[in-house]
Amino acid sequence: MKIFKLLTFTFILFGLISCSNHDIKYKLINKKIKNHYENFHTLKDYKAIVLIPREGCGGCISDATSKTRELLMKRRDILLIFTDVTDMKLLKIQFGNNLLKDPNVSIDIPNLFVDKRVSSIYPQIFYLKNGKCDFYEIFDVTSERFRTL
Amino acid sequence: MIKKNLFLIVLMIILLNSCNISSIKSDKFNKEGVFKIKLPHQTALASISKFECKKIGDSFYFSFLDSQCRTIFIYSFENRNLIKEIKIKSDEFDSYASSYLIHNLDSIFLLDHNNSDLYLINSNGITLKKIKIRQNYLKENQNIFEKNTPYPCDNLNSSGFFYLDKKIYITSSGNELNPHPELCKDIYIINIEKDTTCLVFTKPQIYWKGNWGYNYLYNIQLAYNQNINRFLISYGADHNVYITDFKNTLEKHSMKSKFLNNIKPLNLDKFKARLTKFDFEKYDYLTGSYCSFFYDDFNNRYIRIINCPLDENKFNEGFNSGVFDVKMSIIIADEFFKKRSEFTIYSFNVIPEFIINGCFYVLDHESYQKNQDSLFFNIYSLKL
């Protein structure tokens, strides 16, 4: 009985700690979103932000960018941010000026999202509610959350 | 009031100069000029896998491989004109993890790191030969393969890919955590005529005991001195440089850095749980390592570049920001390996892409950011 209580207590304690770490990450993501777009109000009509790092899993990045480009042609409620961009010329060669001039596409020039607490080598998607991120995951068009967006 | 303003002006000048991270600031270097190359419109610096500057016949040629457009661009070093664009025709060749070596303007070797393939192509980019390096082993090498088989890879920083007398010599990577380092051989020799491969050069004894991390301390550098017809091999954790013909001759000479007095393997007793990426990186940076090695044929001397050990605070700052403030050291030794000089440099990048006529050609990233239609190399000579 004592062991059971101890295990339950430990489980709850870890649960609380992990929740708190999770909250911190959401706070950080939203802080960076706010810094990048200046305020959440301008994002209220958007459903998601796709964040694509320029350094990381090359195949994933290339795939995510081409999928997002297709998406942007069909729907205008998704935003795209390129982060960790070390060579603008390469970005233009690979994706063309038209994509980069699209108002839904932006470059994270100060590298706000290049932060180990937030960044990933894989493209990520931040789902928005009233301009704020309420869920995030590795960007995958087959994910259930994305399919119901 | 005047003194206070003067102090602020001096401080501003110091701060403004310290922002220029591309230039080497040292009384040991003379800036001789800038080597500027006009980039093709379809090429960006970030897509360039490798640079080479090589003498073929009486002339020098500068070249690079663009992974994105799968093309080798060759320029005249003298007048900087683009003279050839060689589009690689093979679809199998993985240009994103690759290297190349120009034998002459109609024979170029390509190394596909991911697939461990060596190609020979002509000036039209057509494959004349393809060798699967990790499969075509000579019979006498068979017994050391399987678990001890590294990947041919011309490694970090300087060159590890040579052609000599119908053979290709390539350094390797992948034996870092092998449980039997005394069985590991580190240099591939590929016979182009017979299409055979062998592995030579047993890993030095310093590596036979202990875990040396995952990366920098295992770094292998290969250079060639044509005056004595010998290869030179430098390792990340080893003070010695080895001189060999890969047949009967092996010598070693110390080219020890005064900053690497305390070079030791990882203390595994400290780690009860599995080692993380952070642990390995911390070990690499706090230990320091030998990184690049060059033979300067113009001055008949050897150059060894060192990553000096970082203190823990600076490592933590670097790990969080992604930029490490590493002090580098450079050793210059004469043809007999007598150390002539060792000096430190506080600069983001002192490692030359190549050394021509005794001068370092150091890529200037900052200038490229301002003008992305050209490449800029700052040219430095050493004052000793």
Image (cartoon, coloured by chain):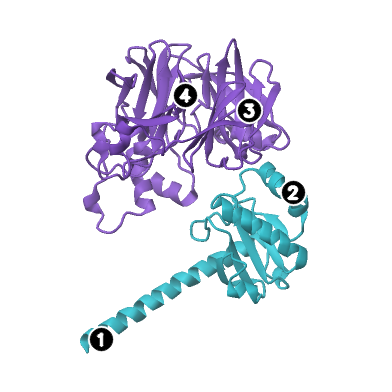
Chain colours: A cyan, B purple
The amino acid on which the numbered mark 2 sits, given as a three-letter code, is: Gly
- The residue singled out by tag 2 in the image is A96
Residue closer to the observer: B352 or A122 = A122
SS class, disc 4: loop
Name the mark on residue B376.
Answer: 3
Mark 3 or mark 4, which has the lower sequence index? 4
Residue shown at 33%/22% (left/top)?
B246
Give residue B178's position: percent from left, percent from top. 29, 44
Q: Residues within 10 Å of mark 2 (few under 14, many from 20)?
A: few
Are the residues flagged by discs 2 and 3 in contact, CB closer than 8 Å?
no
- Mark 4 chain: B
- Numbered tag placed on residue B42 in the rendering: none
Vertical placement of residue B33 versus B375, above or below: above
Amino acid on which the number 4 mark rests in the picture:
Glu
- Residue carrying label 1: A4
Residue A127 left/right relative to B28: right
